[in-house]
Structures are given as structure tokens and as C-alpha cells.
Amino acid sequence: MTSPAMTASEPVPFLSIEDLHVRFDSARGVVHAVRGVNMRVGKGERLGIVGESGSGKSVTAHTILRLMPDAQISGRIMMGDKDLVSASSSEMRGIRGRKIGMVFQDPMTSLDPVRTIGSQVVEAGRHRGLGRREARAEAIDLLGSLGIPRPSDRFDEYPHHFSGGMRQRVVIAAALMGAPELLIADEPTTALDVRLQARLLDMLWVLSQERDMSVMLVSHDLALVAGFADRVAVMYAGAVQESAQVDRLFDRPAHPYTDGLISSAPRLDAYDHPPLVPIPGSPPPPSVRMAGCRFAPRCPRAAALCREEEPALLPLADQSDHRSACHFAEQVQAHGPIPAASVASTSHNG
Amino acid sequence: MTTIERTRTAEERSSGTSVWRTIRLFWADSLIALVVKRLFAGVATVLVVLAVVFLISNVIGDPAVLMLPPEATAEQVEALRTELGLDRPLFVQFAESFSGWITGDFGVSTWQGMPALPLAIESFAKTLYLAEVTLIVAVPLGVIFGLAAGRRPNSWVDRLITSISALGVSMPTFWLGLLLILVFAVTLRWFPTNGYGGLHYAVLPACAMALLPLGRIAQITRSSVADEMGKLYVTAARTRGLAEGAIGRQHVLRNAAIPVLTLIGSEVASLLNGIVIIEVIFAWPGIGSMLITSIQQRDLPLITASVAVIAAVAVLVNLIVDLAYLFIDPKVRR
């Protein structure tokens, strides 16, 4: 994979993932869940990772902290000059919580039901070397700043005393106690109602700003990511298809899949937006081997080349931090995906 | 919930209108109230069990006929019926027995000629000794095996322990007892074949009885630990930088203990069943042996007293398990 020179506009990467592959052995053969992911997160940058379920976004997020013991990982996950793929488990323990924290989708099950929330929030702080009192004071501060009323009273309560939204705040506080430089949030608001989603993401945004903390927001919700992230990576079938600054990605998508995602998502800010266009078909299962672009069977723009050669994630000619894995990236960006008929007539059936 | 109740209580105390209500509100929330309520329910349970025993002993035939040898004359039977008060209407007999049960008077054992309840309690103490030794073997070993297997599902340790516990669960207790006698008492002569005495005498019967609960506890502990290890809160704790050992001690152990505790409670109860056979095989003079003999002797007071003791113990064990939940599972507390 070619690694283009960084431009001045791009922040210094805190974490960079290079050609990451993740495979699982299953009863029905090897499942190749992540196939050659390339992405980077800058210091203090908010990166959104968008994709359908099964796109490999969550597996990528979990792989960064090496949370799946039976995953076969290849490629590199560089944090500074340390490669997390080859780090020992004790090195990983030092990184988890203190360098990279994580928040999960389901706030109802990501807290231990038989321990007080306080004891769980302080854990990462204690791990960082804080004393008992210091950790408690800091945890109470943090819980308060995340909008939990009377945090010192609620410190000794149990998870079942809290609503879903409140629990997710507790979970975020527990992750932030380790003062991580990167927070991975895997669908952190999916289980919550829409109003809470927005509030929680606002809080997260402010916290990342205050702490100069990078955030990797994994979500299937394009609109949610648009309002939060500085940069977006769109994943499909185990690989990043397009990544760009958030405005640029939405204004001038350079991949038919991104274009399809945008046209199929409802918008609240436009009364007269064009009718929603769903992407036809469904993603290929990760156990299937196929030649060429994995989006080709669903792509309106697919040509013979697309079925033969898998496109690499390459920067666009005019902007090096806008990358697209499409043979026709420039054309898609300029004219939108062309209906299949006009292309099919010029292509030989491959 | 509790805070609301407490403020209300305080208001009422200051106004002084309803002391009774104050007491009731306090009562509703206290641990003592729970224990007292459960004890009352337990006494009721024991009484129902005794009523069933009373009913059965009258259904299976005339107690007087059963007590006397087959060649007894009708006059002899009639005389015994009058002597024991069996000629009165059944409900009068029941009422009399019932008032006896409540006051702890189970009558005089016809076989031993002594008050039945002290006899039953005395032999239960011997059973308790055997049960203690059994539990001291079964519970820690079961939990340790289960933990070792559950921490690494599908490892060779897990496979070994899973097979051993399957063996333990499927082996009939009486057969194992006989096997142990044959190997360790008759052939190797390490332990006495039967009888009551020090720890030496308790080893074989305790081992015979321990294998079943040990296997079950190991199985449940294993699956409970494996379940908990797969839960999201464990992964979340891992992302906070906790070491595996700390995750096990601080998070998994207590969650995994909840189903194991339930099982231990029911194992203790079923131990009291299994002990009857083992006591007969090893001639252990506990409540099991006595229950069997008293049934053979048609000694109704002793049967009733023995059943009462066993039922009361089962009720107490359940109460203790429920109280233990309060300490382990915060959802049970309010």
C-alpha cells in the first residue's frame, strides 16, 4: 500500500493502522472480517468510522486493544513507535485504560452488576497510580461533569439504580479515569434514545476538546458521525472505502458506496430533499472470497475493471487527505455514480 | 424509596400521632423483619410436612394392626388402639398431634420408650457431623475445580474436570459407598468398614456422599464462571487496564457465586436425602438410620419427630442461603 506524504493540514497521527487483517477460525471456515484496513487518528482528532453491521468497523476497534483472544491479526497498529499487534499482554495492559480507553455499545451490560459504580469508575485511576482518596475525588468530579446529579451520593450505588443513559455516562467516566489519549467509542449511543444520543455526544465532544483527547467514534449512523467527527472513514466489507474531512466527504463523496449511504440516509434539515435511495442488495458475507472490488455487485458504476482488480485506498489527485478505494474516484466525485446501464453497455462482461 | 420512607417516619414521630405506623414502616425495611417473616413461613412449611406424614401414616393402614405382629388377636389390636388413642375420630387425633408439634411434644417413641424429639435431635447431631465432613470436602473442591475449568474453557484442565464431575454426578451414591468399602476398608484396610467414631470413621461415608455435590458444584461453577468471563463488563474491565487476576477476583468471582450459592443450598437439602442410604450402608447412627428403623418399627412419634428435624434443617438452610444473597447480590437488597 502506498503511503502518501503527509500534508501540513493533517494532524500528527496518534495511532495509525496499516494493512490490518483480522481473521477468525469458525466451523464454516476462516472468516476474514477485516481485510486490509488503513486509517489514522491524529492527536486530539475525532475520527468517525461508519459502516453497516458486518463491515468490520467494530472488529477493527476491538483489535486496537486486542480484545479478541481468538482473532488472528496481521498488519500494524502503530502508536508512536510501538506496534500494538506485536505488543506483549503486559504491555497491552499498560496501554489499555491509560493510553487508549474504550466505551461499548450496551451500557446495561458493560458495568459489573454486583459492584458499586464508584468502585468501577476509580479502577482505571487506581491503575494509573492514584491514591484511594484522590481517585474517589477525581471520579466524583468526572461523574459530575458528565451530568450525573449528586455524584458523591450516587458513587456508592449499584448499576441497577441507574437508567441506561446514566449508566453510559458512568461507563464513559470509567474510561476517562485512566486519562486516555484516545477513546474508542463503539456505538456508544445506539442503545439510547435520540435526545440522549445528542447530549452524550455533545459531552464527549467537549471532553475531547478540553483534554485534547482523540476519539474514534464507531457508528452505523452517518448523521450522528457527521455532527461529531472531524474526519470520517467509511468501511465496507472489511476495508476502508473512503476517508476524508467530514465536510468534504459529505459534499463531494468520491466513492459510490459513500454516495449511496448519503442518499439512503434521511435528513432532518431539509424539507424538500430528494427521495431516499436505498443501496440495492446486501454486503458479501466475510467468509466469501471474491475477486475485484467487494462493492462491485451493488455498485451502479461497476465496470469490468471493478470485477477484476481490487482498488486500493489512494489519495485523490487534488487532496491528499481525501482517499478513496474506487477505480473511478475522480469521476464519481465530479459527476456522481453513473447509472449502471450507461456503463454496462461499454464494458465487456467479466 | 428508603429515603422517602425515612422522612415520612420522622414526620410521624414528631407529630406523635401514629407510633404503630412508625414501627410498621421501620419494620418493613429491616433485616430482622425479613428473618422473622421467613422463620414463620418456615414453621408453617414444617407443619404442612408433618400433616402430610400424619395423613400418610393413617392412609397406609391401621397403625395398631401394623405395629402388632400378624398373629395378634382382634382384642389385642383393640386394646392397643385404645391405649394409643387411635379409636378416637381422626380429626381429634390430628388436633392433638398438631398441638403437640407446636409445643415440641412429639410423644414417646414406642420403640425406644423415650421422648421422640430429643432422640431425633441427638441422632441428628451425628448426621450433622457426617454432613459437615462431606461439605468440607465437596464445596471447596467443587468450587476450586469449577474455577480452574471455567477460567479456561476447552483447555485440557477443563476437559479433565468436566469428565470427572460428569462421573461424580452420574455415579449412584450407594454403589460408590459399597465400592469404597470394598477397596479402602476390606482390601486396603485403611479405614473401618462401618460404625460411628472419630474422623477416621467419617472419611469413607463422607467421600461417598461428597462426590455427587462436588461434581454438580464443579459443573455449575464452571459454566457460571465461563458465562461471566464472556460478559461485556469483563471486557470493559480489561479495557480499563485491569490484569486478568484482578478481573477474576474483583468482578467475576462474586457474579459467578450467585448461581453456585443457590446450588449449594439445594445440595445441602438433597444431602439430607442421600445421607439416609449412606448411614444405613455404613451403620452410622444418624437420623437417616433412625428414620429407617423407626419406619420398620412403625414408631409413629419417632418418624414424625425425625421428619420434623429434617424439614426444619432444610428450611433453615434455605433461609441462610437467602440471607447470603443479600450480601452477594445488591439487586436483592432494596
Image (tube, helix red, strand yellow):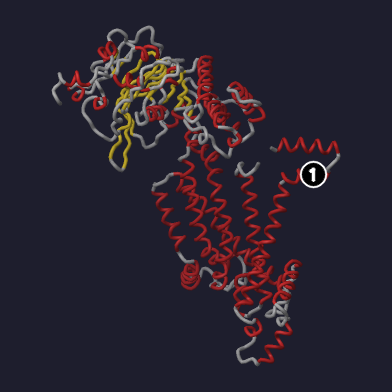
- Position in image of residue A130 (x %, y %): 59, 25
Image position of A80 (left or right of B144) = left
Above/below status of B325 relative to A82: below
Quadrant into which the C terminus of chain B falls: top right
Q: Total marks drawn?
A: 1
Residue drawn 61% across the image and 47% down it: B325
Taking A169 as reference, is A23 left or right? left
Residue A102 percent location from the top left of the image: 47, 27
Q: Which residue is drawn at 47% across and 39% down?
A: B231
Q: Mark 1 points at which residue?
A: B21
* Mark 1 closeness class: few <14, some 14–19, many ≥20 residues within 10 Å: few
Q: With respect to residue A42, does B26 lie above or below?
A: below
Residue B68: x %, y % from top left: 64, 86
B47 relative to B195 in the view: left or right: right
Q: Position of residue B89 (x, y in %)?
A: 71, 78
Residue A100 appears left or right of B205: left
Q: Is residue B41 above or below residue A315?
A: below
